Amino acid sequence: MMKEAGSTMKNTHKQGIIQDKILFDEKEKPIYRERFHPDGSFKTGFPIFGMKGEISFITDGPFVELGPQGDVEVIGYFKDYHMEGLWEFFYPSSKNLKAFVSYEKDSREGGFFVFYPNGSLKIQGFYKNDMRHGEWWVHYPNWNMKSILHYKEDGLEGICKNFYPDGRIKIIATYKEGIKHGEYRSFYPNSRPKVIAYFKDDQKNGSYKSFYPNGNIKAIGQFEDDFKEGKWTVYSEDGRLVKTARFDYGDLRRKWKVSKVKS
């Protein structure tokens, strides 16, 4: 940083290593700042705006931040002292892009993209008023889909899906205002059903079925406010009845009746 005529400079050191430089004008107002990594290597430099003698990170114009090895880690822009437009983030010690984030007056607004170190897309979504909104995609490193999510004002809304790495469906769930509400289905890696349930306000309510990997029913029952309710029946993997019981809001009212399973 060049020292200007009529200005003064304040340096901050830690154990003899430069950590911070601040340039003041002739009226002793802070006008520029440079920051350094713990080893003394340059990190970033930017204009600053001071109020009542306090140093602020508010800037106006281009912004670049470097890693310990001198590689660019952040590229952005400030307008009227606010983060504005497209910001780029990079993985440390590499030129690989980590994320694209769009800002409008410090709030995330518009497209949002995150990448794996190998360059493949990890997350793709959209922000509205600094909140997640609309359809979001999450990928595995091999580009296969991991999740398809729907957001409204930063909360999950509607049908959301999760997938196994090979692309087969893992979970289909319905959300309302960020919590599970409605039908819920999970699947084994072989695509056979694992659980079919219903949720209300993030609690299991209504019929419930679980299955073995071979497709046979494992258990059938009802839930009320996340508690077992009414008659429950359990089956063996080959489809034979194992035991039954009756519940009253989670309390076992009729003990499990065990059926003899012949070999």
Image (cartoon, grey):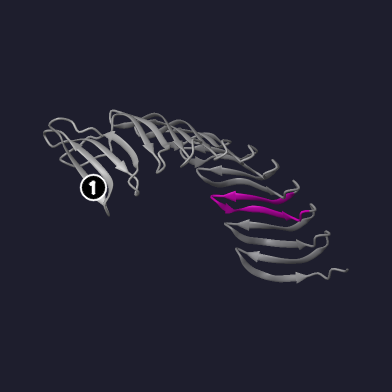
Where is mark 1, residue-wise? 12
**Quadrant for the N terminus in the image:** top left
**Quadrant for the C terminus in the image:** bottom right
Please tell me whether residue 245 is drawn above or below residue 112 in the rendered image. below
Identify which amino acid the numbered label 1 is placed on.
Thr
Which residue is found at the position 42% from the left and 42% from the top?
A: 69
Where is residue 239 shown, x and y percent of the image? 83, 59
Which range of residues does the magenta coloring cover? Answer: 193-213
Which residue is found at the position 38% from the left and 34% from the top?
A: 107
255 lies left or right of 26: right
Residue 212 is one of the magenta-drawn residues: yes
57 lies left or right of 234: left
Q: Nearer the viewer, residue 160 or 158?
A: 160
Q: Nearer the viewer, residue 103 or 197?
A: 103
Q: Nearer the viewer, residue 108 or 116?
A: 116
Q: Secondary structure at mark 1?
A: strand
Where is residue 194 shown, x and y percent of the image? 71, 52
228 lies left or right of 37: right
Q: Nearer the viewer, residue 171 or 98?
A: 98
Where is residue 52 shown, x and y percent of the image? 15, 40
Indicate the quadrant where residue 244 lies. Answer: bottom right
111 lies left or right of 259: left
Which residue is found at the position 56% from the left and 43% from the top?
A: 175
Residue 250 is one of the magenta-drawn residues: no
Where is residue 49 shown, x and y percent of the image? 22, 34
Please tell me whether residue 246 is drawn above or below residue 196 in the rendered image. below
Indicate the quadrant where residue 209 lies. Answer: bottom right
